[in-house]
Amino acid sequence: MLLKISSKEVLVVENIPKSYKEGFMSAWNLDRREFLKVLTAAVATMGFPASFVDKVEAAVATKKKPTVIWLNFMECTGCTETLLRASHPPLGRFLLEIVNLEYHETIMAGAGAQAEEALNRAVKNYKGEYILVVEGAVSTKDGGIYCQIGGKPAIQILKDVSKDAKLIIAYGTCACFGGVQAAYPNPTGAVGRGEVIGKDKLINIPGCPPNPYNILSTVLYILTFGRLPEMDELKRPTFAYGRRIHDHCERRAHFDEGRFAESFGDERHRKGYCLYKLGCKGPVTYANCSVLKFCDVGAWPIGAGHPCMGCTEPGFWDTMTPFYEHLPKVTIPVGEGIITDAERIGTMAITGAGAVIALHAGAGVIKSGLKKKKGEPQIMSSSDEKSEKEEG
């Protein structure tokens, strides 16, 4: 036996066969360093210490590969592309090794009738055992005729295939919440997968695109612990979507000190100051982009000087627009520092979102109880700021 599960569900690794490691790395052209980099990053994404790398590796080595059926609907394929183009280390190849991918239109060789036969065969042969991954929104208007594959509406394909799935992962904001297709006036009646088949057996991995480590870590978590990760009310894994962009943003210190870029390309923008006034939605967006970045080189929008657009949140094309204007009624610091002796939670309702989101301006919450000392900066809301400029 290669691993044991204690009564407390803590994995105890006894041995991982050398033949497995060598075979895995040889088959996918991975050296030992790349292999461990993938596992280490995935373990860190899940919020576990480095000591869990061996435990996750043991689970991958000994558990039966889960079968995956991957459907593509109304989307740009950017979610799959982001996964496949992560090459250092090669996440796409790694994921293909730990799952049995039976159907994926973007990367499969078959087409037409051959592809349809492969899908039907996979659903039949792995009934009740497969994981269904959905990428893209589905059309509901006029019987779903605005998105069809092989002459069959996507909404019907989704219902048919999801019926016998063991687990369903919506990958990308389009699949989770409808994405750009569902933006007003939404002429095709596009919706996320949950609005068609319900939220049972559901995990949402939103983002436009999502970080590929989030789906990889979700799969590894299930393989390692045999259960779903903790999720929030939107069915997102809390290890990836439990904190705001703002909480770990590299420009957070500038926000706390009231240093903001006023326009793209100005001196403050070039110095890397906070992008809130340029429309950054980081204070109301839950994701791990600020600590788990993209493109093999640690790239992400705010690091490149572009504000967060809130793409992991429901309806962001409507609720977060105009993208280059900051959200109203958000309390922000002004001046060169804030001194406090108490804390309070500020709240704000995003128009159209129907949700109240806690905001903060320092150490996790908006600071209050300011000591009114001489020369000490005050706190000003964005609406007060606008009024002051108009009066001036």
Image (cartoon, grey):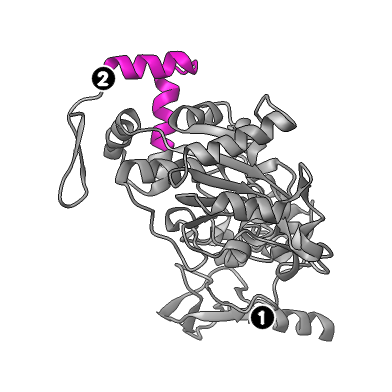
Residue sitting at x 32%, y 34%: 63
Residue 199 shows in the view: yes
* Quarter of the rendering containing residue 217: top left
- Which dot, 2 or 1, sits closer to the camera? 2
Between discs 2 and 1, the one toward the N terminus: 2
Which SS type dominates the magenta stretch?
helix
Whole-percent x, y for residue 315 in the image: 69, 66
Identify the residue at image location x=65%, y=76%: 350
Residue 328 as seen in the image, left or right of residue 217: right
Residue 138 x %, y %: 71, 56
Residue 116 occupies which quadrant of the picture? top right
**Mark 2 in CB contact with mark 1 (< 8 angstroms):** no
| Residue at disc 2, secondary structure | loop
Q: Which residue is disc 2 drawn over?
A: 17
Please tell me whether residue 101 belongs to the stretch shown in magenta. no
Residue 169 place in picture, x, y as percent: 53, 50
Residue 257 in view (yes/no): no
- In the image, taking residue 63 as reference, residue 35 lies left or right, namely right
The answer to which of 47 and 337 lies nearer the viewer is: 47
Judging by the rendered image, the residue that carries numbered circle 1 is 329
Amino acid type, callout 1: Lys
Q: Amino acid at mark 2?
A: Pro
Of residues 374 and 212, the one drawn nearer to the viewer in this rendering: 212
Residue 33 forms part of the magenta stretch = yes
Give the crowd class for mark 1: few <14, some 14-19, many >=20 residues within 10 Å.
some
Which stretch appears magenta? 17-41
Q: Residue furthest left?
A: 7
Please state, as top left, top right, bottom left or bottom right, where the C terminus lies in the image.
bottom right
Mark 1 element type: loop
**Seen in the image, is 93 located left or right of residue 57?**
right
**Which quarter shows the N terminus?**
top left
| Residue drawn at (33%, 19%) of the image | 20
